[in-house]
Amino acid sequence: MRFTTRFAPSPTGYLHLGHAFSALEAFDAAQAARGRFLLRIEDLDRGRCRPEFEAAILEDLRWLGLRWEEPVRRQSEHMGQYEAALQTLSARGLVYRCFRTRREVAEAIATAPHGASGEVFHSEALPTAEEGERLARGESFAWRLSLAQARAELGRAFDELAFEDEAGPVHAEPGRHGDVVLARKEFPASYHLASVLDDALQGVTHVIRGEDLHEASHLHVLLQALLEIPTPLYRHHKLILSADGKRLAKRDSSATLRSLREAGKTPADVRTMLANAT
Ligand code: GLU
């Protein structure tokens, strides 16, 4: 299969040096492999995403010298696909409605009896009558992945889940995440669900992203197994830190590509800064 990778920013702010590094890592890898480079706009969080940030992202990436296949995939235009995947999982009892508030979930974790492994949340579907009453009252809920059901369905394959990282094979431990939220009543898909589906739908063979998402990959492998979609190869790259050694955040305006450009830096300067920062 032809090497295919992607950069998948969320338009919640301006791109900074950390994003530039991630985008260039993926773009350069695609160039070197004579493969495909895709851009995906992860704009499911309607409260935080803004069209002006999306426009700025495209402009900044073009300025940096990146080119990608058109059309760009915008997650908000594919809600139906995420809903269909959720329904598939639901029909198999792999997700359940959880009506607990974030605070109640935090309390449940804090008071769980099983020590170190009790740091994550597990629950189960409510009895049908109670669930029906809560739905009728219009209460909010999250769709959570049932790890117990996933384990029951996959059997031994659950314990053998793995992914290939640049440094070698990694045994996946999705249990570390507990029963994660895959969607909410008013929100068709979490980052996890949408991201693994999109990678499959877009034929991504190599996921290249920051090491802050290494943990997420443990869960993504499980979702791929349940959805019967391929597991790509992974590369989790180092994060670019600010001068004081902290992780760059979208609010660090001095490190945005816009401000660097306005200060007269060129794309070549950005590459030099990144080479010196890693
Ligand atoms: N939208 C995600 C982010 O901004 C992308 C993560 C990924 O590459 O899977 O962190």
Image: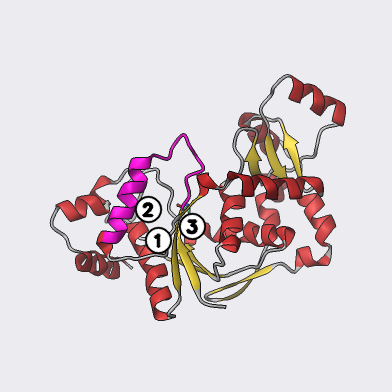
The answer as to whether callout 2 falls within 8 Å of ligand 1 is no
Q: Confirm whether the magenta stretch covers residue 50.
A: yes
- Per the model, the C-alpha gap separating discs 2 and 1 is 7 Å
Residue placed under numbered mark 2 in the picture = 247
Give the quadrant of the N terminus: bottom right
Badge 3: few (under 14), some or many (20 or more) residues near its Cα, within 10 Å?
Answer: few
- Frontmost residue, 77 versus 10: 77
Report the residue at 71% width, 50% height from top.
Answer: 117
Magenta-colored stretch includes residue 49: yes
Q: At 77% from the left edge and 48% from the top edge, which residue is drawn?
A: 94
Q: Sequence order check: which comes first, mark 3 or mark 1?
A: 3
When asked about the image quadrant of residue 103, the answer is top right
Query: Which residue type carries mark 1?
Result: Leu
For the residue marked with disc 3, what is the amino acid? Asp
Which labelled disc corresponds to residue 212? 3
Q: Tell which residue pokes out farthest to the bottom in this image.
A: 33
> Pointer 1: what residue?
239
State which quadrant residue 228 falls in.
Answer: bottom right
Residues under numbered marks 3 and 1 in contact, where contact means CB atoms less than 8 Å apart:
yes
Please provide the residue range marked out in magenta. 41-62
Work out whether 136 lies above or below 111: above
Image position, residue 255 (x, y; %) = 26, 52
Q: Position of residue 209 (x, y in %)?
A: 47, 63
